[in-house]
């Protein structure tokens, strides 16, 4: 109870600027929690989906791969859906890679969404703390100017001590939010790097499966043409027989 009472006293003696800092702390914490949950779920769903898609792409069953990505909402599915759609229309590797790069440009802003707000709230909390201290010092010096000379020193030291509470609270809010912002950036970068890796691996798998398919199909067509082609007759032999 002693610690709790000290916290309440610290907050109450800080002045009116403690309340805006508290609101900023609540908003920053809410955004940080939402981003952490969203990114962790996204990373897990991407891993699960890629584990399902990798053997399907390696086998060359592109129709099944298209059905899998249509039924899923992960970033990996959104990324590969563009590449697989382009694979059905064209067979050039460059066109498939361009399609996935276009999809990557749409996915990246969604992953980075609202993360900059955490750093913004961190800066706002720190600046509000400094502003509260400055306003508190102005009030303190104004009050000291009208006080008795014997009480000026004690009154000034007490007023400065109270005014510093807003700076302390602003820093206690801003520093953790800044650390959280760095962690969120690191997690977002990890997901983006994994998507780029998936894009390269998927391109290699699609290209390899397509090449194997085209190596088999011409062989079949060549054999079938040899079987169905009519036997050529020798014109010299025909002339000898007729003679």
Image: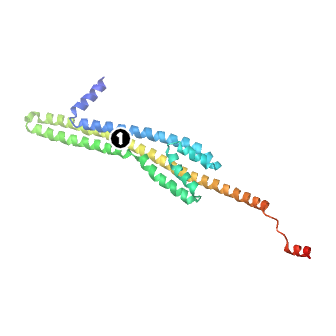
Q: Tell me the SS state at disc 1.
A: helix
* Residue nearer the viewer, 114 or 155: 114
Q: Which of the 4 image quarters holds residue 4?
A: top left
Give the residue at mark 1: 177
Q: Quadrant of the N terminus?
A: top left
Taking the spot 40% from the left edge, 45% from the top edge, the residue there is: 182
Taking the spot 55% from the left edge, 55% from the top edge, the residue there is: 86
Q: Quadrant of the C terminus?
A: bottom right
Taking the spot 54% from the left edge, 45% from the top edge, the residue there is: 69
* Residue nearer the viewer, 81 or 9: 81
Residue 34 screen position, x and y as percent: 40, 38
Q: Report whether residue 68 is seen.
A: yes
Q: How many marks?
A: 1
Q: Which of the 4 image quarters holds residue 142?
A: top left
Q: Report whether residue 172 is seen.
A: no
* Residue nearer the viewer, 122 or 222: 222
Residue 80 screen position, x and y as percent: 54, 49
Residue placed furthest toward the top: 1
Q: In screen coordinates, is 62 left or right of 26?
A: right
* Coloring applied to the structure: rainbow
Residue placed furthest toward the front: 242
Q: In screen coordinates, is 111 left or right of 72?
A: left
Considering only vertical position in the picture, is 1 above or below 153? above
Residue 93 screen position, x and y as percent: 57, 58
Taking the spot 18% from the left edge, 41% from the top edge, the residue there is: 135
Residue 239 screen position, x and y as percent: 88, 76
Q: Residues within 10 Å of mark 1 (few under 14, many from 20)?
A: many
């Amino acid at each position: 109870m002693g610690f709790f009472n000290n916290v309440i006293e610290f907050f109450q003696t800080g002045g009116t600027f403690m309340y805006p800092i508290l609101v900023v702390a609540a908003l920053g914490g809410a955004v940080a929690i939402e981003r952490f949950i969203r990114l962790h779920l996204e990373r897990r769903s991407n891993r699960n989906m890629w584990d399902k898609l990798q053997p399907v792409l390696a086998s060359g069953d592109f129709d099944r791969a298209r059905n899998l990505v249509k039924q899923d909402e992960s970033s990996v599915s959104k990324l590969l859906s563009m590449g697989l759609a382009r694979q059905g229309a064209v067979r050039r590797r460059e066109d498939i890679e361009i399609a996935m790069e276009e999809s990557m440009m749409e996915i990246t802003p969604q992953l980075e969404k609202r993360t900059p707000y955490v750093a913004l709230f961190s800066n706002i909390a720190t600046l509000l703390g400094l502003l509260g201290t400055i306003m508190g010092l102005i009030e303190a010096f104004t009050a000291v100017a009208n006080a008795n000379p014997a009480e000026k020193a004690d009154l000034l030291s007490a007023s400065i001590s109270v005014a510093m509470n807003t700076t302390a609270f602003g820093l206690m809010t801003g520093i953790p939010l800044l650390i959280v912002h760095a962690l969120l950036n690191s997690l977002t970068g990890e997901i983006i790097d994994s998507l780029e890796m998936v894009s390269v691996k998927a391109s290699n798998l699609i290209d390899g499966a397509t090449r194997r398919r085209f190596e088999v199909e011409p062989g079949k067509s060549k054999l079938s043409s040899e079987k169905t082609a009519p036997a050529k007759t020798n014109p010299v032999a025909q002339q000898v027989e007729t003679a």
